[in-house]
């Protein structure tokens, strides 16, 4: 196969084919962050409603025992969102660098591989943290 000149349409098409996977990853991260944000909103709404309940003498006062668990869930969701956003940032950097290196005629395959793996690792870490939050969410507290 003949090398493709950095300024040709064929080279641009080649770069576009290389950024398809990171682009799909970026879309997946955006969807995942949306899911995390929705869950975080529900957790924070529940925390606010429980904090508004008087400490004693109210029929709902015993529900305030759930506040530490909800606060832990909120911290985990915050961490998962941060890791997900970092994954998206790395994927975006990968896409920008792929085009920049193509424009400059620089070999980018090893750097792209490292950035793609880093982005996947960050997303994987976010999924693990999200799994921990789900595990907490599915305890007996939610069934009373």
Image (cartoon, grey):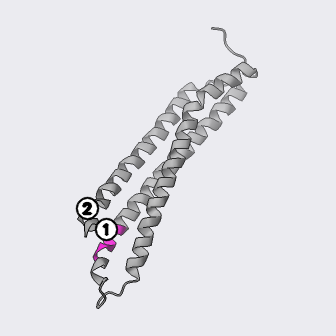
Quadrant in which the N terminus appears:
top right
Q: Which quarter shows the C terminus?
A: bottom left
Helix, strand or loop under label 2:
loop
Measuring from the top left, give residue 116's x and y in whole percent: 51, 35
Outermost residue to the top: 1
User: Cβ–Cβ below 8 Å for labels 1 and 2?
Assistant: yes
- Which stretch appears magenta? 65-70
Q: Residue 107, relative to residue 40: is it above or below? A: above
User: Which residue: 66% across, 29% down?
Assistant: 101
Q: Nearer the viewer, residue 73 or 142?
A: 142
Q: Is residue 51 above or below residue 37?
A: below
Q: Which residue is mark 2?
A: 139
Could you tell me if residue 47 is visible in this image? yes
Q: Which label's residue is closer to the chain start, 1 or 2?
A: 1
Q: Is residue 43 above or below residue 24?
A: below
Q: Which mark is residue 15?
A: none
Which of the two marks, 1 or 2, is nearer to us in this view? 2
Coordinates of residue 130 in the picture (x, y in percent) = 38, 52
Q: Is residue 18 magenta?
A: no
Residue 86 in view in this figure: no
In terms of secondary structure, what is the magenta stretch mainly? helix
Q: Badge 2: how crowded within 10 Å, few (<14), some, or many (20+)? A: few
Label 1 sits on residue:
69
* CA–CA distance in space, label 1 to label 2: 10 Å
């Amino acid at each position: 196969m003949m090398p493709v000149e950095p300024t040709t349409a064929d080279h641009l098409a080649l770069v576009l084919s290389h950024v398809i996977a990171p682009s799909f990853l970026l879309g997946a991260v955006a969807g995942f962050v949306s899911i995390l944000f929705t869950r975080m909103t529900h957790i924070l709404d529940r925390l606010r409603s429980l904090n508004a309940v008087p400490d004693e003498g109210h029929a709902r006062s015993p529900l305030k025992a759930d506040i530490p668990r909800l606060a832990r869930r909120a911290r985990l969701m915050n961490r998962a969102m941060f890791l997900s956003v970092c994954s998206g940032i790395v994927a975006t950097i990968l896409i920008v660098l792929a085009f920049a290196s193509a424009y400059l005629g620089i070999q980018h395959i090893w750097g792209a591989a490292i950035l793609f793996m880093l982005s996947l690792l960050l997303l994987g870490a976010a999924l693990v943290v999200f799994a921990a939050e789900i595990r907490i969410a599915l305890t007996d507290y939610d069934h009373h």
